[in-house]
Image (cartoon, rainbow, N blue to C red):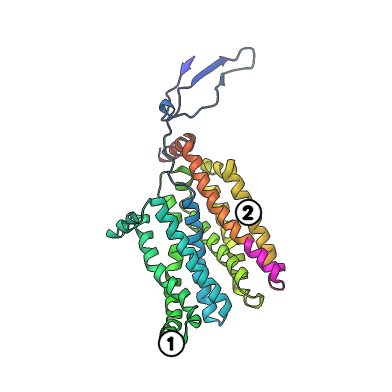
């Protein structure tokens, strides 16, 4: 009996060999038990993220806000007033929920304000904070401009100023929207959590597609049927991008893709795929002719986007709890280097 040297995070394994006997049989037959990956003293190698439900909501609503600003800018340039108005209000709502979820996770507002004391280009959290600061006021001003007609006559000057500021503010918000939609993927991938870190190449594309699908879904909900053409195309294109990037991501992740198919993460992501497929079918065959079909399709896209973010979040948390998702990728990288 021989004892092999145990690697980091793996208990020593006993290799048993049995001599093959008899004519025509040479060599040794190895009988090796499956490796059991455990950490020292039963402790996890990577600490699980302390984030709670606030963060999946933050990931989702930030994507909705970003995609909605882009869709609203296009609607503004093409004269689709109802689609523009609905998406601007949706962007503002998404931005408010995003900031609320972030501040709630931080514990108190002063911690968010403290993050504005520095600018660190190598920190996704620092850059994301400044993206929110640059995007938020412009998205808010664009949304408030939609309410100018509700002001009393004595405020006519303010109403005119608001109407005139709507388009410039909307265009500035749309400029920052792509960064807002994908920086959260960079934020997750910059951690040591195995399933997030190993997905760093494709995860921004998954989030970009998910944000586009969600924004298109919102457009299908808030606009009349004859104005939903851009929303339908954005939603279908976003769902296609998400599906393609997800396939590439899982291939590149290796063993760390396993948590995406098990437990709560597997249920969330499986449901997200089904909802996106239903949304695409509705957008292609029903949303252009039926208001009910457009609403159902839009709700499917929004729910699918939310479950995508929740599934990816849960997969990362699950990967941090199992030492093998840390040890196996490390050994594979070491083997390639040797």
**Principal secondary structure, stretch drawn in magenta:** helix
Question: Which type of secondary structure does the marked residue at label 2 adopt?
Answer: helix
- Say whether residue 120 is left or right of residue 51: left
Q: Is residue 130 above or below residue 164?
A: above
Q: Does the segment drawn in magenta span residue 63? A: no
**Within 10 Å of the Cα at label 2, are there few (<14), some (14-19), or many (20+) other Cα atoms?**
some
Give coordinates of residue 74: x percent, y percent. Answer: 53, 76
Residue lying at the far left in this picture: please name it.
117
Q: Is residue 178 above or below residue 57?
A: below
Give coordinates of residue 232: x percent, y percent. Answer: 62, 69
Which of discs 2 and 1 lies nearer the camera? The answer is: 1
In which quadrant of the rendered image does the C terminus lie?
Answer: top left
Q: Is residue 287 above or below residue 270?
A: below
**How many marks are shown on the rendered structure?**
2
Residue 273: give its label. Answer: 2
**Within 10 Å of the Cα at label 1, are there few (<14), some (14-19), or many (20+) other Cα atoms?**
few
Q: Residue at x 47, y 34 (%)?
A: 323
Q: Quadrant of residue 30?
A: top right
Residue to which mark 1 is pinned:
154
User: In the image, which residues are magenta?
Assistant: 284-299
**Residue nearest the viewer, comparing 218 with 318:** 218
């Amino acid at each position: 009996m021989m004892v092999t040297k145990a690697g980091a995070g793996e208990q020593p394994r006993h290799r048993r060999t049995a001599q093959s006997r008899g004519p025509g049989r040479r060599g040794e037959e190895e009988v090796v038990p499956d490796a059991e990956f455990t950490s020292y003293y039963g402790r996890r190698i990577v600490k699980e993220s302390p984030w709670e439900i606030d963060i999946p909501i933050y990931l989702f609503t930030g994507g909705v806000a970003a995609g909605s600003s882009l869709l609203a800018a296009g609607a503004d340039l093409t004269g689709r007033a109802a689609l523009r108005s609905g998406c601007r209000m949706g962007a503002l709502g998404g931005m408010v929920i995003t900031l609320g979820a972030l501040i709630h996770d931080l514990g108190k507002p002063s911690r968010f304000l403290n993050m504005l004391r520095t600018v660190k280009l190598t920190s996704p959290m620092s850059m994301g904070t400044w993206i929110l600061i640059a995007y938020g006021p412009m998205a808010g001003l664009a949304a408030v401009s939609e309410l100018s007609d509700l002001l009393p006559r004595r405020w006519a000057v303010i109403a005119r100023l608001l109407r005139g500021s709507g388009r410039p503010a909307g265009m500035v918000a749309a400029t920052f929207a792509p960064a807002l939609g994908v920086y959260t993927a960079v934020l997750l991938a910059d951690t040591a959590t195995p399933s997030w870190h190993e997905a760093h190449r494709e995860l921004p594309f998954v989030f970009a597609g998910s944000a586009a699908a969600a924004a298109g879904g919102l457009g299908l909900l808030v606009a009349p049927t004859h104005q939903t053409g851009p929303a339908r195309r954005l939603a279908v294109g976003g769902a296609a991008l998400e599906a393609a990037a997800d396939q590439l991501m899982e291939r590149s992740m290796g063993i760390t893709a396993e948590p995406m198919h098990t437990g709560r993460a597997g249920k969330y992501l499986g449901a997200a795929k089904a909802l996106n497929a239903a949304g695409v079918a509705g957008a292609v065959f029903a949303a252009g002719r039926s208001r009910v079909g457009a609403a159902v399709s839009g709700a499917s896209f929004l729910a699918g986007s939310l479950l995508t973010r929740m599934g990816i979040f849960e997969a990362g948390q699950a990967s941090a709890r199992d030492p093998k998702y840390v040890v196996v990728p490390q050994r594979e990288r070491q083997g390639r280097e040797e």
